[in-house]
Amino acid sequence: MPIIEPEFMALTADLDVAAWWAENEACAQPGRNKPRCPASFSPDDHWIFEFMAVPSTLRYYHDADYRNALHAEVNAITLAHVGRAFFDEDTWRTTPKRIENLFGCEFGYHEGSTPWLMSVTDDPDEFAAVLDRAEATDLRTWSLPEEYLAEWEERKAAGKPLPKLGTGSRGPATIMTSVLKPEIVFYWIYDHPDLMRRFRDVLAAKMVEFNRILREFSGNDEPGWWITDDNSALFNRRLYREYCYPVLERVLAALAPGDARRYQHSDSAMGHLLEQQYALGIRDVNYGPTVDAAFIREQMPDALINGQMPPMLLRNGSPEEIRARVVEDFDKAGGNGLLNVTTAGSLAAGTGVGRMRWFMQTVQECCRYDADGRG
C-alpha cells in the first residue's frame, strides 16, 4: 500500500494542487517579481521502493515492463494527491556506457538495494594497467553499445522522443571513490601521488571526450552541466583543490562555457568547499542538510539555492517542525528571489504524499513575495 499520511491529508484538505502547480510555474524565473518561491520534489528509485513496498528491487532493474507498470501505478497516485507524475512510463532497457565503466567499474545488483558500483582493485600496479587501457580505448566505438544503438533506432523509427545525452554526471570525488575504495583513494594520494594525479588527468580528459561523443550522437548542442558528487565531503580543501577542482574546471570549461548552467548536487556536509565551488562558476546548488542556508547565501550570493529542507525532517517531523524549517530557510536565503524550496538531497524513502502536500501548502502560505512583510 502506498504511504498516505491521514494527519497531513486532513491538514491539506483545501489544497488545490492544480492551482498550486500553475502558480509554481509562474514563479520559476529568478528575482522577487513573482508571487512566491518555487518548490519542487525529487523522488527516486529509493523512494519508490518504500512508498510501494516493492517486493523485488532486482526485478525493478532487470524487467523494463515491470518497472514501467510500477511507474504508472505510482504516477496515478501522485497525480491524484500531489498533482504531478514524476516517473517515466516508457523506460529504456539499455544505456550508454558510464565514465566509471572506462576504468573497469561496473554495477553490482543485490536484492533489497539500489545498484552499487563495485571498486576495481587495491593493487597500484594493476590500476596503472587500468589507466593504460582507459587511455588506449577508442571511445567512439566503446561509448554506445550495440544494444543501445539498436534500441535508439527502434525508438526513432517509432517516433518516440530521444534524450539529449552528455548533460552531466557524477563528480570526480564520487567517481574516484567508486572506481577505488574510498580508503584506497586516500592511501594512494599519500603513498602513490603520481598514480592518483594520473587518474585525475585521465579522468578529466576522458570525461570531456566521452560526453562530446554523447552530445554529437544525440544532437545535443545545449551547453550546461550537472554534477552529482555526494562524496565531496570526504576531501578536505587542499585535496579537493588538487584532485577534484582540476577535473571540474576542465569539464565545465568544455561542456558549460560562459554563463551556461553549472549545477552541483551533494547530500554531504561539504560546506568547507563552497568557496571553490563558487570559483568554478557553480551557481545552481543542492547541498546536504547540514549546510546552512544562510552560509550558502553568504558564500554564493547570486546562486540559486535548491533546499534546504532536511529530507528526514520532512519524512519524520511534525507539521509545526516542517513549517518552521521552511520559514527559516526562506528567511535566510529567499530574500533575493534565488531560492527553490526543496529537500537538501532527494526525497527520503518513506515520505508519503500527505507530507508532500503539507510541504506544498506551507510554501504557498509562508514563502510569498506578494505579501507585506515577507522576503
Image (cartoon, rainbow, N blue to C red):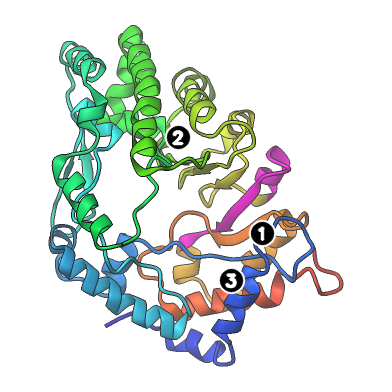
Tell me residue 62's x, y (percent).
13, 58
Q: Which residue is mark 1?
A: 329
Q: Nearer the viewer, residue 154 or 321?
A: 154
Q: Amino acid at mark 1?
A: Asp
Q: Amino acid at mark 2?
A: Ser
Quadrant where the image shows the C terminus: bottom right
Q: Residue 172 placed where, x, y %?
A: 40, 30
Does residue 362 lie above or below 229 as drawn? below
Question: Gap in Å between the C-alphas at discs 1 and 3?
Answer: 12 Å
Kind of residue at badge 3: Glu
User: Dot 1: what SS?
Assistant: helix
Q: Is residue 180 visible?
A: no
Q: Which image quadrant for residue 40?
A: bottom right
Work out which residue is located at the far top of the displayed protein and give it.
Answer: 194
Query: Which sits in the foreground, 323 or 285?
Result: 285
How packed mark 1 is, by other alpha carbons closer than 10 Å (few <14, some 14-19, many 20 or more), is: many
Q: What is the C-alpha distance between the residues marked 2 and 3?
A: 29 Å
Please state, as top left, top right, bottom left or bottom right, where the N terminus lies in the image.
bottom left
Quarter holding residue 61:
bottom left
Q: Is residue 192 magenta?
A: no
Image point (57%, 38%), residue name: 271
Give the labeled residue for mark 2.
232
- Is there any visible trace of residue 292 in the rendered image? yes
For the point 29% across and 69% down, the residue is 89
Viewer-nearest residue: 88 or 312: 88
Residue 357, numbered circle: none
Helix, strand or loop at label 2? It is: helix
Q: Earlier in the sequence, mark 1 or mark 3?
A: 3
Q: Which stretch is magenta?
A: 294-311
2 or 3: tag closer to the N-terminus: 2
Task: Read off the residue under disc 3.
Answer: 321
Tags 1 and 3 in contact by the CB under 8 Å rule?
no
